[in-house]
Image (spheres, rainbow, N blue to C red):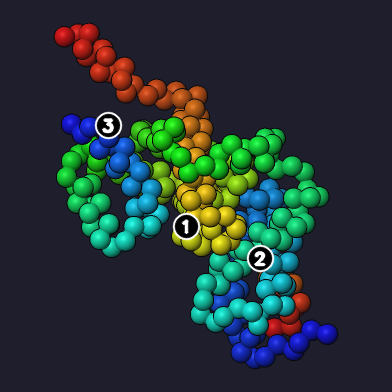
Amino acid sequence: MAKEKTAKEISVFEEELLPHMDALKTFAYHLTFDDDDAEDLVQETYLKAYRFIDKYQEGTNAKAWLFKILKNAYINQYRKKVKQPTKVDFEEIISYHDTDDKSKTNYLDLRQEIFQNIMGDEITTEINNLPIDFRTVILLCDVEGFTYEEISKIIDVPIGTVRSRLFRARNILKEKLKSYAESQGYKDIRGKKKKSESEEE
Amino acid sequence: MRTPEQMEDFRQKIDLYLDNALSNEEVTAFESTANSHPEYSSLLERASEFRNLVKTKVKRSTCSQNLINTIKNNIKM
């Protein structure tokens, strides 16, 4: 039989946990790609959080705690029954990319002009096209502002892995956005400009 | 003109800086470096703009009133 919640626990739930509903829904939506599934996931998260509210320490990181519950709920239920979120073999991608060696991957630097050619829809589309673990770290870090340590605890991987996934996820995202901008007529003339200038000389 | 090694070192620190993963001392040193040369500051500006683009343009969801009511009813608040 479930233990009766105290007035204090109910107060903590309402004041510290409920304000994160929309952030959780955003995360859930980008995991499931379905509004109803996302709401189911948020509902399940809050019901679990309420059931285990005695495990939560008041004034600690409520948002990170909720995100971890949601991530686990997603893994336990939705990924098994819902359509595969990506066409790429997930484990293959992770085992290939989960190294902390960045030396073989160049840091991709996007030109400012590219930003002007990109609308919000493309950002969302390309984030959603990322393999799930890359998408997850982008959402947790760049969208929700979690620290490496918090992300490490939410997704149960070492901080070094969080950093390497972020590095690669951002580079993939930049490549995709660059390709999109080029398809819209943007041309990256770096290098070419210098070459033509030297030819004129 | 910065050397490729200097630029690479700076690039690696950009992520840590924008992710708030540097100590106070490291932040001071990084900002000093960033302000020391236009190539650095330009690189930082573009990286910062990319982050801002992702943060502000990604689709965000809001919970329906029905979901909010369901959660509150389930826990009888």
Res A158 visible: yes
The part of the image, by quadrant, that contains residue A46 is: bottom right
Q: Chain of mark 3?
A: B
Q: Depth check: B71 or A88 in front? A: A88
Q: Depth check: B69 or A42 in front? A: A42
| Left or right: B41, with A126 as reference point | left
Q: Depth check: A6 or A40 in front? A: A6
Residue type at mark 2 is: Ile
Dot 2 or dot 1: first in sequence order is 2
Nearest to viewer (mark 2 / mark 1): 1
| Left or right: B25, with B48 as reference point | left
Residue to which mark 1 is pinned: A148
Q: Chain of mark 2?
A: A
| Residue ID at (73%, 66%) | A44
| Residue ID at (66%, 37%) | A92
Residue to which mark 2 is pinned: A69
**Residue furthest out toward the bottom:** A7
